[in-house]
């Protein structure tokens, strides 16, 4: 008899799968020529599915729709941006354990995937709106940092927190002058 997963188990499995998939897609960039199999905006003539579908959908749905980026010529993506990525692929970054520490390439892949896996989860799993959440966060409490980041994502999708953050950053670059949610997000990203 097959048992169904509980909602908590399903969420945990989804988190694990998106984490490993995102990391694997980023690690693929260690192979020179990976952009030829990536898809738009780098390889537009491609007939096969992208080898990096999660990353490709983030670029297509979010990055390419931003003002300033949506009007760039295809040559920018195929020449300038592709050159930067190909140079990183060819760079002599350590892949293995050197002198008892993780290599540079693995460290970069881990850090990038830790940041990107959240938008990937939101894109594939959706993000239910939380209304009227508390706006006070204790930056010394891990649960509050997690809640602050989750509330920030909610407010970025359903509210105007990004506009407010940009306006406040234009006024001051002193983190202490920002609201507690911004401080919580900052701490969450540093810890994660």
Image (cartoon, grey):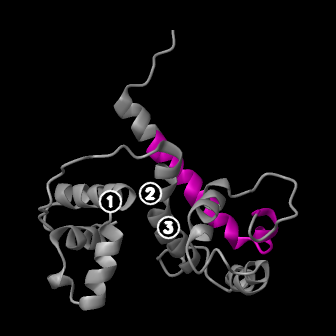
Instruction: Determine which residue is flagged by label 3.
Output: 110
Separation of residues labelled 1 and 3 (CA atoms): 30 Å
Residue 39: horizontal and vertical position, in percent?
77, 62
Q: Nearer the viewer, residue 129 or 123?
A: 129
Lateral position of residue 124 relative to residue 53, left or right = left
Mark 2 or mark 1, whichever is nearer to me: 1
Element assignment for label 2: helix
- In the displayed structure, 10 sits above or below 88; it is above
Report crowding for label 2: few under 14, some 14 to 19, many 20 or more residues within 10 A (C-alpha): some
- Asked which quadrant contains residue 23, the reply is bottom right
Instruction: Determine which residue is flagged by label 2.
Output: 118
- In the displayed structure, 74 sits above or below 14; it is below
Q: Nearer the viewer, residue 120 or 112?
A: 120
Q: Are the residues flagged by discs 1 and 3 in contact, CB closer than 8 Å?
A: no
Q: Which residue: 73% across, 83% down?
A: 76
Separation of residues labelled 2 and 3 (CA atoms): 13 Å
Which of the marked residues, 2 or 3, is nearer the chain's N terminus?
A: 3
Q: Nearer the viewer, residue 101 or 18?
A: 18
Element assignment for label 1: loop
Lateral position of residue 90 relative to residue 62, left or right = right
Mark number displayed over residue 159: 1
């Amino acid at each position: 008899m097959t048992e169904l997963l509980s909602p908590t188990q399903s969420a945990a499995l989804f988190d694990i799968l998106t984490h490993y998939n995102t990391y694997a897609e980023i690690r693929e960039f260690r192979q020179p020529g990976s952009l030829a199999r990536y898809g738009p905006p780098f390889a537009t003539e491609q007939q096969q599915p992208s080898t990096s579908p999660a990353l490709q959908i983030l670029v297509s749905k979010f990055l390419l729709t931003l003002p300033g980026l949506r009007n760039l010529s295809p040559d920018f993506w195929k020449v300038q941006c592709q050159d930067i990525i190909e140079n990183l692929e060819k760079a002599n970054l350590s892949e293995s354990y050197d002198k008892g520490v993780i290599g540079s390439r693995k460290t970069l892949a881990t850090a990038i995937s830790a940041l990107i896996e959240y938008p990937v989860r939101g894109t594939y799993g959706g993000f239910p709106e939380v209304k009227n959440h508390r706006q006070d966060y204790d930056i010394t409490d891990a649960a509050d940092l997690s809640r602050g980041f989750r509330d920030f994502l909610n407010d970025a999708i359903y509210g105007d927190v990004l506009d407010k953050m940009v306006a406040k950053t234009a006024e001051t670059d002193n983190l202490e002058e920002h609201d507690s949610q911004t401080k919580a997000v900052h701490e969450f990203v540093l810890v994660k």
